[in-house]
Amino acid sequence: MRRKSLVFLLCCMFAMSSLAAGQRYTITDLGPLEPTGINSWAQVIGNYNGRAYTWTKWGGFRNLGLLPGGTFSQATAINDRGWVVGTGNGPGIVISPFPGRSNEQCNDLTQPFLWTPSQGMLALGAVAVSSSLSSWCGLPFHGSGLNDSGQVVGYNDDMGTTYQDAFIWTRSAGMTLLGPNYPPSMTHDINMKGEIAGEACTNSIEIGHASTWKDDTRTDLGTLDAGANTTEELWASGADGVDNVGRVVGWSSTLPVYIAYQGYQTVPVHAVIWNSSGVIRDLGTLGGDTSSAAYKINLFGLVIGSSGNFDWAMWQPHGAPFEVPGRPFFWSERTGMQELNTLIPQNSGWLLKTTTDINVWGQIVGSGTRNGHRHGFLLTPLNPFQVF
């Protein structure tokens, strides 16, 4: 009896030490591919040499090609049906929402595409963002998010902030703008319920706040500022990912980015999560760092992002999600924030640099170096349930 108790105690101690060690991952080398997304079936998308690709363990790499007359393609998101959204170039139409001005046919328009296994790559065109521009063909439009219903979201490049707007595309309605009170606005992700995550300017001094859109209604998610009634408009935040229960991840400034009589300043930002009720939570940083940002969240609340010492500045380009160069992290409610490089086999030759997506099983894709050479990677958890 005493021996059985001792064996049981040793087993418990082993299990506890295993849990304390945290999650561990195996690494699949994806070669020169720069991964940008992964779905529940472990289908990976990414880019190499100006072309969009998919990768699967059973089928290897597949070149998704180009739009007719195009010269490049970039994949940004994949859904569980294997559909891919991204950006490419080629002939396209910019739809005019302005009375008295016609649509514009462009010979070479940078525009979103939707790729499906059965139909290949479809050009989605664009929608004009201002009637004051003499031509809309020079504005680049990007596809950034996709859900299983085939709804596509995106934004056009920052053109001095005056002409930047977010949009949504559906097969039934085509492309429509998601305008805030002031430009610029951007969208980065969309969930199964049609909730869109991004950011939008909230005032005339062009400081953006994390926002969600649903049925043409925008919700300002706010910032970490405790004095929201008086100074929150001087703080910045952004939303990069949304899961299917409405939790949103992104970043928030930890100080005002605009000081009266002093103008704009650089400030540290922290990775944050908003719960489905819109309550914000600071996820902090890795030890020794000043800034962090969260990029994606899966159905089980597992978050990926990056931590470093790169502060946010008002004058940085706002044509893409804000990133913090540094060390990629994994976060869960139980483990807190952990550096991913400490959770892979040591002496593997790998140094993980960035993460871009996480699927429902906790598999993570991103880019790093292996023995000094740039490679894409797929991380697969040894025990997907160890983080709960």
Image (cartoon, rainbow, N blue to C red):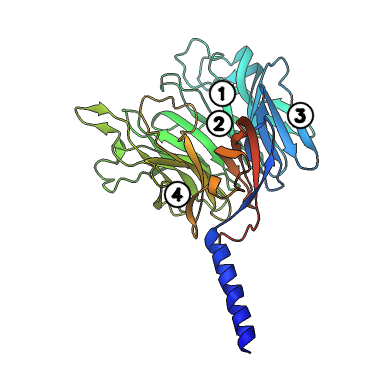
Q: Is residue 343 above or below residue 210?
A: below
Asked if the residue under mark 2 is in contact with the one under mark 4, i.e. CB atoms within 8 Å, the reply is no
Name which residue type carries label 2: Gly
Q: Earlier in the sequence, mark 4 or mark 2?
A: 2
Residue 313: horizontal and vertical position, in percent?
36, 29
Q: Earlier in the sequence, mark 1 or mark 4?
A: 1
Residue, disc 3: 120
- Badge 1 local density, few (<14 within 10 Å), some, or many (20+)? many
In the drawing, what numbered circle is on residue 273? 4
**Mark 3 element type:** strand
**To which quarter of the image does residue 265 belong?**
top left
Marks 4 and 3 sit apart, C-alpha to C-alpha, by 36 Å
Residue, disc 2: 154
Q: Quadrant of the C terminus?
A: bottom right
Q: Earlier in the sequence, mark 4 or mark 3?
A: 3
Name which residue type carries label 1: Phe
Q: Earlier in the sequence, mark 2 or mark 1?
A: 1
Left or right of residue 375: residue 310: left
Asked if the residue under mark 1 is in contact with the one under mark 2, i.e. CB atoms within 8 Å, the reply is yes
Asked if the residue under mark 2 is in contact with the one under mark 3, i.e. CB atoms within 8 Å, the reply is no
Residue 92: horizontal and vertical position, in percent?
65, 17
**To which quarter of the image does residue 219 belong?**
top left
**Mark 1 element type:** strand
Residue, disc 1: 141
Marks 1 and 4 sit apart, C-alpha to C-alpha, by 28 Å
